[in-house]
Amino acid sequence: MERRDFLKLSALASASAYIPNVMSASNPFLQQAASAGKAVVVIQLSGGNDGLNMIVPYRNDIYYKVRPRLAVVKNEVIRLTDEVGLNPKMTQLQSLYDRGMVSIINGVGYPDPNKSHFRSMEIWHTASDSNQVLQTGWIGRFLDEQCNTCAFPYTAIELDDAMSMVMRGEVKSGLASTDPKKLVELTKHPFFQHIVKASDEHHHHHPQVEFLRETLVQTSSSIDYLAEKQAKGTNNELYDSKLGKQLKTAARLINGGSETKLYYLRHGSFDTHANQRGGHDRLLEQLSNGIGTFMSDIQKGGRSEDVMVMVFSEFGRRVKQNGAGGTDHGKANNVLLIGKGVKNAGIYNKMSSLTDLDDGDLKYHVDFRSVYKTVLENWLHVPSEGILKKDFTDLGIL
Amino acid sequence: MDKNQQIQHFLNRACFGARPWDAQRYKSIEDCIGKEFGKARKFKKLTPLVDIRSNKRVGVLRAVLQLLKSRSDILELNAAWLQRMTSNAAPLRERMTLFWHDHFATASPFAVLMQAQNNTLRKHALGNFRELLHAVAKDPAMIMYLNNQQNTKRAPNENFAREVMELFTLGEGNGYTEKDIKEAARAFTGWRLNDNAFFEFDEKKHDNREKTIFGRTGSFKGEEVLDMLLDNPQTANYIAGKVYRYFVNETPDETIAKALGDRFFASNYDIEDLMLTLFSSSWFYEDNQQGAIIKSPVDLLVFYKKLFNVRKPYKELFGKMQKVLGQVLFRPPNVAGWKGGRAWIDSTSLVLRMNMPLMFFGSPIDIETAGEFDLEMTIDKKRRRKLESVRVEADWKKLEQHYKKEKDLIPALLNDFISCNHESIDLDYFKQQLSETASEEQIKWGITRVMSYPEFQLK
């Protein structure tokens, strides 16, 4: 046993240490992956994204009146309709919009909204009611419900070191890794491999030992699987930002033919209480550029028909700017669905009123679990009621 | 179980694990229990932070400053508690404090409030649950966390009333209705924080009209609702059942839990009596209890720190490890606490757990400082993330000395580090691996390997 074999631990302990990809990029058109099926890429905007400066009501005088320091200037807005425009930094999103690949859902939220980051994010993760505490996430429950086809944790992957509650089910959970090809190094030592092999060959009387060793076997094969797909997939485009790097990994896995159904990515922080404009614009630019590059990559990999991107945040921000050139925690917000499979692309519903407010915040009109339902049933083709614990309205856009 | 196994089993469950030399320090299991409970009677506050809630009014500016400072403060507090858990002074009291932190799960943007709550939990950790519940209900971090600050006569907020029944006393669905929650919420109106962030009862915001709760009608105050909950034996049963799953076996045993609950109720909620009964019962030492519980991330970190006598706090590293393994002190996932049990194990955490012993070889580990351990939600655009290389200073001397005299190293290691039976471990392979290692390195590698087995994750 060599000491250097152990030094790979930093692969996990470090989130951002990024090894340049040395895999050769073969002809992307040779990457066949049609059998891998549909997938969803969820992008969480952590911290409460200011939706009003992303999807801008540029004809509305009230918007300019209550945000004298913050509003996006009318002639800079990227106009989508007579009423609604995009933040000027989101040119790549505009191009996807123009190609009919974007659906903008306005006023998404839930009854009795909570303005704490943690609680509201937890509500989005667990898909609970506002006064209900659940300990499993909707993606975790998707894994629980789909036991027959989701034998392995690679079915849902969070591109991060630590796994969020959203990925945890009652008996199953997804896999968390910033970079599967670095995670795989932690499993390649002969001693580790011996334990995996022995675990696969024997059953154990002790229920906890059996549980751990069975998890180990599934884990090891899942990590191998992901690392192989990641190596097989290719990227041609350049990505910037931390989000970009996560999207790059996702694109490689998708182009490599991974049968992963859900990818979970986090971007932010969007908690812009002070001096919002510059920082917020930059985050939106990274989001738009990242998605644009990703879409172009999976197009080249022949997978663009299979992938739907969903962008959400735990809440929006207050309609009025605050005294520090920022915005405070609000309520309803936009959700974006992006992909070739979007039906009736464009603005799905009217923007929330800027005058009929809930204590200074936008009112919600669409329950966020309706978006989940739409994605689960019409994209991943699984029944949603067991996962969401209730029946919600199908938005009819996928 | 033989004498040593009994002592190990008790220390694993009650005192963050037994090092190879710990068990032999006690004459018998009774001696061990007696000494550990004796040590746990001492109460020493944990105060790494200066609590500024003194006489001056807090005010908005001071609150904001405090909030900004809280990010580094919470890391400080986290490291201090982890360090305290490794101390041999009163590990049982710290273990119980952690149990209550999990039970009364709270998070706060204000680190000093978490420090204050932590000391409240510590103070009552082995005391009386009745007093503990009353104290926590008025705890400032809890008041904020469950929105009692917003609970007023004009606009009642049900959050605290709901969770106190669902999670802190009766348990979900056990003997309360939505109506009981609504009415109880009115009894807690006016429970709030004053400008110095201490508890106060605001008579003007309190709804003193009649309420009907659990079939009784009166103009109840919050304290009376807590007493009603405590007068219901279901509360004792619920707590006893949770204690059983946490300290004895993840699979519940209704008969034993019921007997524990009855005794807990009869003792008027004496926590020390409950725990002493549990640890003195013969069923606690039956063979099938060995390895019945999966170690929590904090179990692992505290044990490693103790085993290798890691003195430096390594705040960022150990904070990061808590995050990746899924248990960050002072940052429970929600008010229900950590799900625990098999939920500790996912693909990534299992791989990391099996590689963890390697952290103590003195190799550099790259970690990201700033922004990583921190709340994900806070503004960090100005703070550059930077990579730092950490080399953990581990002390192997004592371990080497301990095993030097050992003729048969492998059985000794298995006895000391693996709490379930060893039949799942391939001894021939283990022996062969060790024989290929240079003799002066054998102890180190043997310890590293034995802790890399999945079985080491059990206690």
Image (cartoon, grey):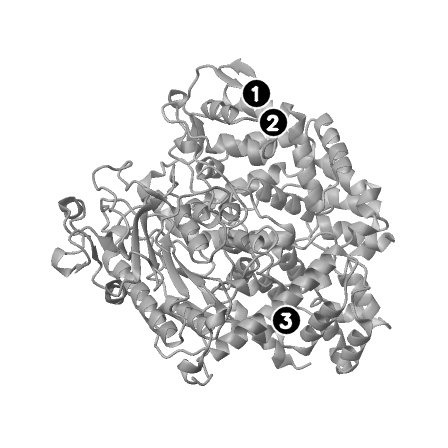
Q: Is residue B394 visible?
A: no
Q: Which of disc 3 and disc 2 is earlier in sequence?
A: 2
- Residue B214 - label: 1
Q: Separation of disc 1 and disc 3 at Cα?
A: 56 Å
Residue B367 at x, y percent in the picture: 49, 68
Q: Are marks 1 and 3 in contact (CB under 8 Å)?
A: no
**In the rendered image, residues at marks 2 and 3 fall on the same chain:** yes
Residue A128 at x, y percent in the picture: 47, 43
Q: Chain ID for label 3?
A: B
Q: Residues within 10 Å of mark 2 (few under 14, many from 20)?
A: few
In which quadrant will I find the N terminus of chain A? bottom right
Q: Quadrant of residue B21?
A: bottom right
Q: Chain ID for label 2?
A: B
Q: Which of disc 1 and disc 2 is earlier in sequence?
A: 2
Q: Are marks 2 and 1 in contact (CB under 8 Å)?
A: yes
B384 up-or-down from A191: above or below: above
Residue B174 at x, y percent in the picture: 61, 30
Q: Separation of disc 2 and disc 3 at Cα?
A: 50 Å
- Residue B358 - label: 3
Residue at 20% across, 62% down: A88
Helix, strand or loop for disc 1:
loop
Residue at 32% across, 45% down: A332
Select label 1 or label 3 by which is in front. 1
Q: Which of disc 3 and disc 1 is earlier in sequence?
A: 1
Helix, strand or loop for disc 2:
loop
A329 up-or-down from A100: above or below: above
Select label 2 or label 3 by which is in front. 2
> Relative to residue B96, is residue B280 drawn left or right?
right
> Relative to residue B317, is residue B451 drawn left or right?
right
Q: Amino acid at mark 2?
A: Gly
Comparing B240 with B55, the one in front is B240
Q: What residue is shown with label 2?
A: B175
